[in-house]
Image (cartoon, helix red, strand yellow):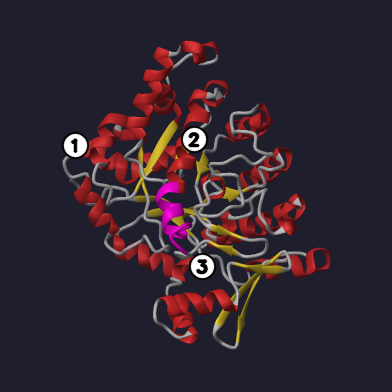
Amino acid sequence: MDERALVVDADGHTMEPDALWTERMDHGRWGDWIPRKVVEDDTYDIIYCGGVVRGGGRELQDSMAAAVGLTPREFHDLTRSLRVAGGHDPDARIADMDRDGIDAAVLYPSSALFFGPQDPIKALHDVEFVLACQRAYNDWVAEYCAAYPKRLFAMATVPLQNPKLAVREAERAVNELGLRGVLIRPSAYVDELPLNHAVYDPFWAACQDLDVPVGLHPGVHVDTPGACRKFGLVAESENLMVTNMAVDELHGGSALGQAVGNTVDMIVTLGRLLMGGVCERFPRLRFLFLESGGGWIPTQLERMDEQVKAFPLEKRWLSLLPSEYFTRQCWAGFEPEEWNLAACAEWLGTDRVLWASDYPHPEFHPGVVKELREAIAGLDDTAQRQILGGNAVAAYKLPL
């Protein structure tokens, strides 16, 4: 096919600069609660949030270094070297995109994913503090994208634990900052009420009125009542969140959380939105199911349809089958290396598939577009163009 087809990364990431929150938040109001990173003894990256250590202190970092046969300093130098400059520097990111043949990218956060309503850090139960942190991120990422307004686009983060505040921030982020949509985690936010509960309807209505998508993006953490918390997929303690390494065989760390937790959360959320009436009540609202693999979605939709036909109680509030809502309002995110990407695209509809680089996270690797082209080479030219970039333009309504 024509190599000049538009290529759009539908799910990349920023890697927020260390000083993002200390430079942008009100020190008089929030003081030591403000998220910050301190390098101690030129060896230990200590992250503070809410006045306590988050992500591990010296003892944890020492144990991680020992587990891989490194000194603490060697481990520090290795992990710092993995922080790709393009995560926080738009010029460096564009250079990397040019290298891989990516025309545009839609960006999701890294650290700013994790401001959930049940975080063990007590300061994060103050929704006004969470909102202040999220506003700082949204302001920063808007400035990051403004360096290349035709190539970099971003999603806003909002405090859905308070739907009224979430609506207010969504409106500001879209109308004032120009962000392309809103991201949430695929989990309950208000108490443990599922996402199809009426408490969230004002938020869904606002996103529909703003004509922006809701990106459902999981995260390996226990700050929301999702699979990582409910099934103990990552270790948890009062002030120490251990989520980025294999802690032991019972918890598994990030790998178990990513492989199992992300998909479990997304299956539940897919069911709540399609079978629980959200797409019925909000027929113009767009949903993006991201970073949980896409190969399971056709099978799950087929199963949902079968069950609705066999047990028709849901037909009291559904006018369509789950797969029909998906075709009307939803997109599935795939990584290029998924072996069944092309087959799933044919089942779902080639206009329902997005691809993701996950840049600059560990899953990313150079040559991702070449790999994608190889994965979809058996599809016709129209389908290839859709998957390479056309679907992302439609889902996010990008001005391209």
Q: Which residue is mark 1?
A: 380
- Neighbour tally class for label 3: few under 14, some 14-19, many 20 plus, Cα within 10 Å: many
Give the quadrant of residue 68.
bottom left
- Neighbour tally class for label 2: few under 14, some 14-19, many 20 plus, Cα within 10 Å: some
Name the kind of residue labelled 2 in the image: Val
Residue 396 seen in the current view: no
Work out how far the residue at label 3 is from the one at label 1, CA to CA, in angstroms.
37 Å
Reply yes or no: does residue 259 show up in magenta: yes
Mark 1 vs mark 2: give the one in front. 2
Q: Is residue 172 or residue 336 the one in the foreground? A: 336
Tell me the SS state at disc 3.
loop
In the displayed orientation, state which residue is furthest to the front.
250
Q: Which mark is residue 269?
A: none
Q: Which residue is mark 3?
A: 88
Give the quadrant of residue 306.
top left
Q: Which mark is residue 268?
A: 2
Residue at 28% across / 47% down in the picture? Answer: 338
In the displayed orientation, state which residue is furthest to the bottom.
41
Residue at 69% across / 43% down in the picture? Answer: 161
Q: What residue range appears in magenta?
A: 248-260
Q: Vertical placement of 387 versus 54: above or below?
A: above
**x, y percentage for residue 224?**
61, 47
* Left or right of 376 in this view: 236: right
**x, y percentage for residue 341?**
27, 42
Q: Quadrant of the N terminus?
A: top left
